[in-house]
Image (cartoon, rainbow, N blue to C red):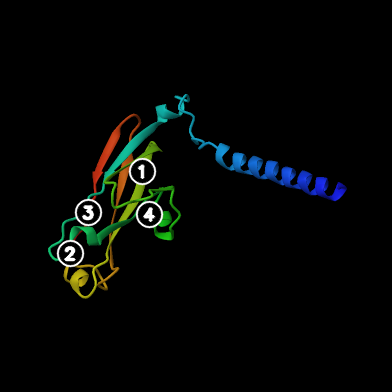
């Protein structure tokens, strides 16, 4: 009799531990790293808005060209080394990306790739053909309380 009660108590204990664990998993809230109530930081910051359209190619269908990178660095050396200040989580569904940055000069790079098979990508200037990548990069300046708009263009 004592053994049966002990098993029931153990099952009850495991049940409550499981419920508590599941409750912990789903109780976490996303934390915004910047407090929207802080306005002092915004006084020294400006905004850069990148318009990142997928270029229309001659031979490649639009759904076969994909955004793969949009990154910002403090200087050209950091950009070259891949030590970015900020990078966007780019998507084929989003065309505009915005970053708030402190006043000063910055460098960016943006990349697209082609996923067509055969020589189709090669005919449209993607080096190496399928999964070939095209890059654009440039320098831009952020001014306090101003929005700088950059339209990204990829050369053929």
Task: Between label 1 and label 3, give the one nearer the viewer.
Answer: 3
Which residue in the protein does label 4 denote?
76
Does label 4 or label 1 sit earlier along the sequence?
Answer: 4
Alpha-carbon neighbours of circle 3 within 10 Å: few (<14), some, or many (≥20)? many
Which residue in the protein does label 1 denote?
105
User: Observer-nearest residue: 121 or 19?
Assistant: 19
Q: Secondary structure at mark 2?
A: loop
Which residue in the protein does label 2 denote?
60
Q: Are marks 1 and 3 in contact (CB under 8 Å)?
A: no
Q: Secondary structure at mark 1?
A: strand
Which residue in the protein does label 3 denote?
54
In the shown orientation, is residue 24 left or right of residue 31? right
Q: CA distance from mark 3 to mark 2?
A: 11 Å
Q: CA distance from mark 1 to mark 2?
A: 35 Å
Quarter of the figure with residue 141: top left
Alpha-carbon neighbours of circle 2 within 10 Å: few (<14), some, or many (≥20)? some
Q: Secondary structure at mark 3?
A: loop
């Amino acid at each position: 009799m004592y053994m049966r009660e002990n098993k029931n108590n153990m099952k009850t204990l495991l049940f409550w531990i499981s419920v508590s664990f599941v409750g912990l998993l789903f109780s976490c809230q996303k934390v915004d790293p910047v407090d929207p109530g802080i306005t002092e930081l915004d006084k020294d910051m400006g905004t850069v808005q990148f318009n990142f359209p997928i270029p229309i190619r001659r031979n490649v269908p639009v759904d076969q060209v994909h955004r793969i990178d949009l990154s910002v660095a403090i200087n050209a050396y950091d950009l070259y080394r891949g030590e970015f200040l900020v990078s966007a989580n780019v998507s084929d569904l989003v065309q505009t990306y915005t970053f708030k940055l402190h006043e000063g000069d910055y460098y960016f790079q943006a990349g697209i790739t082609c996923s067509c098979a055969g020589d189709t990508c090669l005919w449209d200037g993607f080096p190496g053909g399928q999964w070939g990548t095209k890059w654009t990069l440039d320098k831009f300046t952020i001014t306090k309380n101003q929005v700088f708009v950059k339209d990204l263009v990829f050369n053929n």
